[in-house]
Image (cartoon, rainbow, N blue to C red):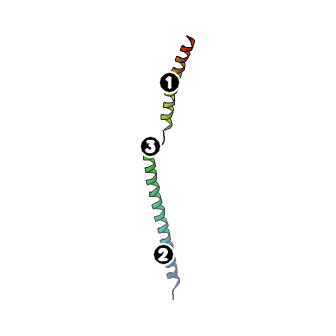
């Protein structure tokens, strides 16, 4: 029959096996997340515009519109 030591050892081995499996799953999830973030970092600029670039482009558009409005005002004044 099993004595108390063997029962504790079996329980400890089972606990360590479950903990090892859980840590392995966490490690794999962490690696998958790193890969996803790396892919996102490389793909993001292809789909979206950075805020700084957007502001620069909008600033240029405003300058061009002001020039157009000024030319229209000069034509109207004649």
Image position, residue 54 (x, y; %): 50, 34
Q: Is residue 2 left or right of residue 42?
A: right
Q: Earlier in the sequence, mark 1 or mark 2?
A: 2
Residue drawn at x 50%, y 71% as measured from the top left: 18
Residue at position x 42%, y 46% from top? 42
Residue sitting at x 48%, y 64%: 25
Residue 38: horizontal and vertical position, in percent?
43, 50
CB-based contact (under 8 Å), mark 3 and mark 2: no
Task: Identify the image quadrant of the C terminus.
Answer: top right
Say if 69 sits above or below 53 in the image: above
Q: Nearer the viewer, residue 78 or 36?
A: 78
Are the residues at dot 1 and dot 2 in contact (C-beta closer than 8 Å)?
no
In terms of sequence position, does the residue under pointer 3 or pointer 1 come before the other?
A: 3
| Residue behind mark 3 | 46
- Compared with 11, 20 (above or below) is above
- Between residue 6 and residue 59, name the one nearer to us: 59
Dot 2 alpha-carbon crowd within 10 angstroms: few under 14, some 14 to 19, many 20 or more:
few
Query: Which disc number belongs to residue 64?
Result: 1
Residue at the outermost top position: 78
Residue underneath mark 2: 13
**What residue do we see at 46% from left, 49% from top?**
40
Who is closer to the viewer here, 66 or 6? 66
């Amino acid at each position: 029959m099993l004595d108390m030591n063997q029962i504790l050892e079996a329980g400890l081995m089972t606990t360590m096996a479950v903990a090892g499996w859980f840590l392995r799953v966490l490690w794999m999830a962490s690696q998958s997340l790193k890969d996803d973030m790396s892919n996102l970092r490389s793909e993001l600029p292809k789909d979206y515009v950075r805020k700084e670039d957007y502001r620069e482009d909008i600033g240029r558009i405003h300058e061009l519109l002001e020039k157009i409005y000024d030319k229209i005002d000069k034509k109207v004044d004649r």
